[in-house]
Image: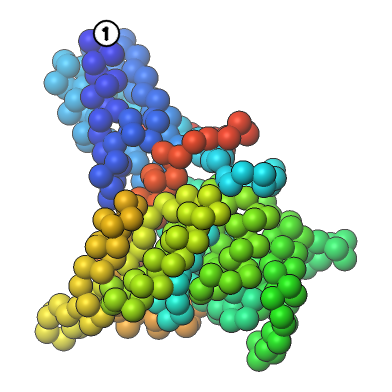
Amino acid sequence: MTLAFETQVAQLRLPSTDTTLAEIGARVTAAVDGSSVAVSVRVGVPAAALRDALQGQVQELAQACGWTLARLEFEQRIASHAVQPNVEVRPNVRNLIAIASGKGGVGKSTTAVNLALALAADGARVGVLDADIYGPSVPMMLGLHGRPDSPDGKSIEPMRAYGIEAMSIGLLVEQDTPMIWRGPMATSALTQLLNDTRWGELDYLVVDLPPGTGDIQLTLAQKIPVAGAVIVTTPQDVATLDARKALKMFEKVEVPVLGLVENMAVHVCSNCGHAEHVFGEGGGARMAQQYGVPLLGSLPLELAIREQGDAGRPVVVADPQSTAARSYQATARRLAAALAQRPHTPRPLSVSLLGT
């Protein structure tokens, strides 16, 4: 009976996703003591939101078996996942996730920053690397000012905001200084930013790539261990046309595409509540279906997202209960679940225990 109960618990779905605990490789154990049962669940995704979301469902399953739920524990073990062949992994960054787009203006940087903050809010240790050498925007979005410290004159301490680590070329030069560099200089700057930054022990390093499929993207794919990529697009045909090129690029260099994010999918009028698909409707879903990748989320077009990003306080931290923030949170959870289903690499796991 205990085995059947564990199987039932494993079939519960992660919050905001269509993925079950079993599908992400969760390990469920139950210990019965008389009329009570203690349940332990080990998962490979950020677990801060899981216990509260699943507590009632596990309790109902226990009651159906004639038990009371004495204790529910969630153990978070975020594994390192396989990267492209012949690329050396970094010892303290378990998973590097590239956020890419085929063209500019689709809200890729806004998406990258808010996804990173959403993963952190769910209990992960997260960093953001701004790889857009020519147009860095992460410092403004995170409200970062000043220069990072260099304790030894060679390496750089990442700056911190809202519980995540961050590094950008924008923190090392004056705000209005243009980076008039050819491709090799830009790619060298990217590898230095990654390798010379003294990152802490991170579960996820979110890399905000520049738009397109040029030198920086190729360097990332060939020299930097990438666990997976996320393609950001808007619903309109011209955006999805370029997004297809970005997706195919990652396929060619053997970097798994974890899914698509459709940004600016719908605008809801703040006065009358009318919903309008300003950039078209369903483009992301059609592209995801065509290429057999998940649609991780459809994000709204809202004035507050832009205003809060410009003010250095992204919507996920500025208004975490808002519709927009919840959309980012749901997308981040689907992203983590998609990565958790990928093959692991044999490296130490990140462990934390959440329970009652």
Q: Quadrant of the N terminus?
A: top left
Q: Residue at x 72, y 63 (%)?
A: 191
Element marked by disc 1:
loop
Q: Residue at x 15, y 77 (%)?
A: 275
Identify whether 49 is placed above or below 60. below
Horizontal and vertical percent for residue 262? 32, 67
Horizontal and vertical percent for residue 355? 41, 33
Horizontal and vertical percent for residue 71? 34, 25
Res. 119 in view: no
Identify whether 284 is placed above or below 66. below
Neighbor class of circle 1 (other Cα within 10 Å; few <14, some 14-19, many 20+) is: few
Q: How many marks?
A: 1
Q: Residue at x 40, y 69 (%)?
A: 243
Q: Which residue is mark 1?
A: 34
Horizontal and vertical percent for residue 296? 33, 56
* Kind of residue indicated by mark 1: Gly
